[in-house]
Image (spheres, rainbow, N blue to C red):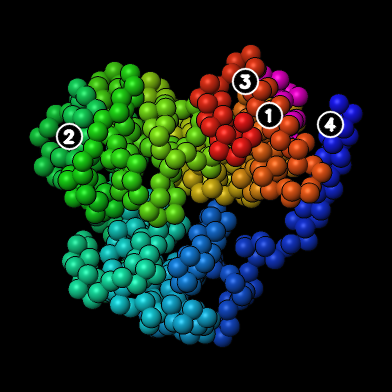
Amino acid sequence: MRILRFTVVLLVVLIGVSIITKALLRQLGTDADPSVLSPFTLEKRPRANHYLFDYANILTHYQEGAHQYLRRISGEFHIESVIVSLPDMRSHISIEELAVDIVNGWDIGKDQEGRGLLLLLVNEESQVKLEVGYELEDVFTDTFTGYIEDLQLRPYYLRGDIGTGLIAVMEEIERRAQIKHQDEYTPGMITELDRELLAGGGGATRRLASYQDNRQTSTAFSTDGRSPGAASPDEAWRTMLTKWSGKGVDIEADIYTEMTKLAMGDQNNPDNRTKAALGHWQNADYQVLQDDDHAAIYFGNIKGWNNAPFLFCNTAQGWKFDIVHQRRLVVMASNPHWMVEQGNYPYVELLSDVRQSTGKDLPLEGEDLYSCERDEEIAERIATLERIYRDNPDEYQVVMELARLNVITGRRANHIHPLLEKAKTLNQNAAEPYKYSAIYNVNSFFQYETALQDIEIYVDKRPDDAFGHSFIGLLHYRLGNYDESIIASSKAVEFNPDNAYAYSLMARDYALLYQNAGALDPRKSGYKNLALDMYRKAETVATPDYNRISWLRAWLKRRDIL
């Protein structure tokens, strides 16, 4: 017993030293801040080993996630991809000329033997250009680059969310980057792939303003004349495919929830990304996994983003597509991998055989948990708040409540960031804007460092809130700072002893410290004992989370802890 106590004391001391050291490094590491840029110049890249240069200030809220993604493209596929936004053309005649000058002046792709990409946005002219390095032209054809600009940028631009669109383009680039990297293609294969694209060629430049006349808008909430949903999940799925194909205009069934309508608009006119994958879904084998009022259209536990499941819920009108949980729970990892978010949510148990992610495993509860039963209520509340906001845009409570509802229902950045920033300005003492900003940064872009800055401000304002400390624990866990995660989770337990989430998180922290410790490290056995102790505490809280405990038990067994 004395040895164990000594070990715990030693752990606390070492944890404290580690945290102080990391805090100093964070303070000194100003170069890690991607938002601080040197003046733009064509002659030299403003910062080496930097992949996003947001001179037009349209990607402020995407910095961390974009850099992580672009670094991964470089590391995995040996393609240097750079995003640049500029407020104007900088005296150039055309965006094509400007893009070539940037690529040449900045040597984009030079260290990768010509395998470079530049995605350039000129904000004043509303133009975008994808410039492709000479070593990539056989795979990243004009047809392909033109297609992904139409496919990705158009719908986001029309929603006033060009930042998300630009990053989404990189996801499409990843698909062909894999083809190039595997080096198992022929010109005929690329030509065939190009024939399948909707754009059909015509070059890689698109004037975004030209899309204004063909704008897609969300369906406003209405309680009048609502059509019934489908009688079963299978019928809902088949009906949705028919509507997406343009052949279901006369079908009475309405298979979108109200929040799905806000997110996706007209069921009979999906966006181009949906149309591009429609043929795959129409021909894919699937099974229906159902548990009471929730169901998943499941294509099997196989790779491929298009093989990720679709989630449906049984509403008062019938079965409908649940876009909120779809965005929240179905995680698109590095292409072609997908996962299902770990946590006590609907659908997760249905998909228990699928690899689970802790990337968005937030300890949400109460009013911050969306459910299909509340879908109409939430959609109607959002519509009401939007009307009030238009008439009175400076009422803090209205702004904050609208932002909160948009966050928990997974709406896009243009519906969230302006409201949260305004809420911070309207009430500088308020904690809530920082809480929901942190939630959004994790749920949408896995921006853990950015979320950590927000939630630490929240905890400073609400130091006795267990949620805030649990959230900090998760972020440090995801960043690999297991010692700091333990301290934050311990504080969460102080404020809420009935906290299976925090105990489970500490069990994972200690297990990974055990796994990473060297064979001669005197702390190793102590880490294992503490992991087991936290696991038992998670099991014996007053209100245990059985799904989480079951997952944790299997996770610990895989690491030889249990």
Secondary structure under tag 2 reads helix
Secondary structure under tag 1 reads helix
Quarter of the picture holding the N terminus: top right
What is the C-alpha distance between the residues marked 1 and 2?
49 Å
| Kind of residue at badge 2 | Thr
Q: Residue at x 58, y 42 (%)?
A: 437
Q: Main secondary structure of the magenta part?
A: helix
Q: Tell me the tag on residue 539.
A: 3
| Segment colored magenta | 486-498
Q: Tell me the tag on residue 225.
A: none
What is the C-alpha distance between the residues marked 4 and 2?
62 Å
Task: Mark 1 or mark 2: name the one nearer the start of the chain.
Answer: 2
Q: Quadrant of residue 533?
A: top right
- Residue 383, x across and y down, in percent: 39, 31
| Residue 59 magenta-highlighted | no
Question: Label 2: which residue?
Answer: 239
- Residue 519, x across and y down, in percent: 74, 48
Q: Is residue 180 above or below residue 388?
A: below
Q: Nearer the viewer, mark 2 or mark 3?
A: 3
Q: Tell me the tag on residue 4.
A: 4
Quarter of the picture holding the C terminus: top right
Q: Residue at x 65, y 65 (%)?
A: 36
Question: Label 1: which residue?
Answer: 532
Q: Are marks 2 and 3 in contact (CB under 8 Å)?
A: no
What is the C-alpha distance between the residues marked 1 and 3?
11 Å
